[in-house]
Amino acid sequence: AAKEVKEFVDPSSRSNATKLNSDLADIQSIMKKNIQEVLNRGEKLDHVSNMSSNLVAESKKFKWGAKQLSFQALLNQYGPVAAIVVFLLFVLYWKLF
């Protein structure tokens, strides 16, 4: 891979344009084949777009739920200690003033 990158970067290499055009043609044919396969399976692009939108919405819900669970875990871990500290401060304040 490093050799191929060096060949593409090396300005003295005569076959840079040929190699680049060949690779781009290969990539283009692969992408056309992939798109054709999707269309041949009967999946419409708008259906795929809707599925993508639904995934985005569900991931946002999942993220919100994960944040809520994280906050609840934080409360469960430090809540009792914080409540005891607040109670002790209240008692000390009451006794001293």
Image (cartoon, helix red, strand yellow):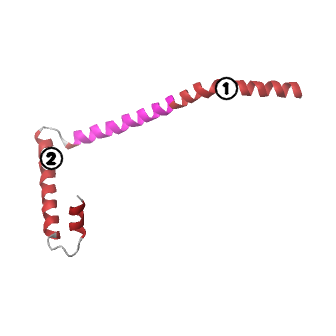
Return the residue at label 1: 81
The stretch of residues the image draws in magenta is 46-69
Asked whether disc 1 touches disc 2, contact meaning CB atoms under 8 Å apart, the reply is no
The residue positioned farthest toward the right in the image shown: 97
Could you say which quadrant of the image residue 28 lies in? Answer: bottom left
Return the residue at label 2: 34
The residue mark sitting in front, 1 or 2, is 1
**Amino acid type, callout 1:** Val
Residue 81 relative to residue 39: left or right: right
Which quadrant of the rendered structure holds the N terminus?
Answer: bottom left
x, y percentage for residue 6?
24, 66
Which quadrant of the rendered structure holds the C terminus?
Answer: top right
**Amino acid type, callout 2:** Asn
- For the point 20% across and 76% down, the residue is 12
Residue 39: which disc?
none
Q: CA distance from mark 1 to mark 2?
A: 58 Å
Name the foreground residue: 54 vs 84. Answer: 84
Q: For mark 2, does the 10 Å Cα neighbourhood hold few (<14), some (14 to 19), or many (20 or more) residues?
A: few
The kind of secondary structure element at disc 2 is helix
